[in-house]
Image (cartoon, rainbow, N blue to C red):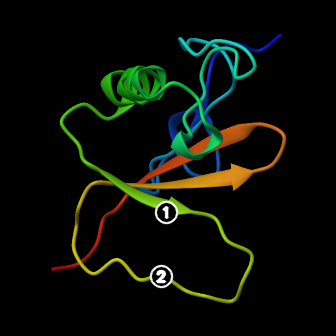
Amino acid sequence: MQKDFFTSQNSKLFCNTGLHFVLTNRYHGVSNAPYNNLNLAYHVNDNLESVKKNRAYIMQKYYENKTLLYLNQIHSNTIFTIRENRGILESYLLFQFAFLYCIQAQLPH
């Protein structure tokens, strides 16, 4: 069972692009059942403190001293544009498990 996260630094395709992301799994978190470990989503009625601790774990391990921007995935043709460098862009895939993609925004001034 793979317990480590896959990151842009592990990717032959993305490692030299300046694009940074982390694909998470269930391990390394503190949420109780039914979320069992690393739940990162506030919208599923998990304990808020557990979600905060889980998110803090990811931030401390990969993106210390950065700020998160939150964007939930929707199924539409809507395009969101980030107009200033605010740190990390976060998006959820709302399927059986919530996975987190973190992308460090590198935008021109």
Mark 2 is on which residue type?
Phe
Q: Amino acid at mark 1?
A: Leu
User: Disc number at residue 5?
Assistant: none
Q: In the displayed structure, would residue 83 be above or below residue 14? A: below
Q: Which residue is mark 2?
A: 80
The answer to whether marks 2 and 1 mark residues whose Cβ atoms lie closer than 8 Å is: yes
Kindly identify the residue that appears in the image at 28 percent across and 73 percent down. Answer: 107
Q: Who is closer to the viewer here, 53 or 33?
A: 33
The image position of residue 86, as x and y in percent, is 23, 61
Q: Position of residue 92 (x, y in %)?
A: 62, 52
State the separation of the CA atoms marked 2 and 1. 9 Å
Q: Residue at x 81, y 48 (%)?
A: 95
Q: Is residue 106 above or below residue 6?
A: below
Residue 71 is tagged as 1
Quadrant showing the C terminus: bottom left
Looking at the image, which is closer to me, 34 or 23? 34
Locate residue 80 relative to residue 52 in the image: left or right. right
Percent across and percent down for residue 16 are 47, 50
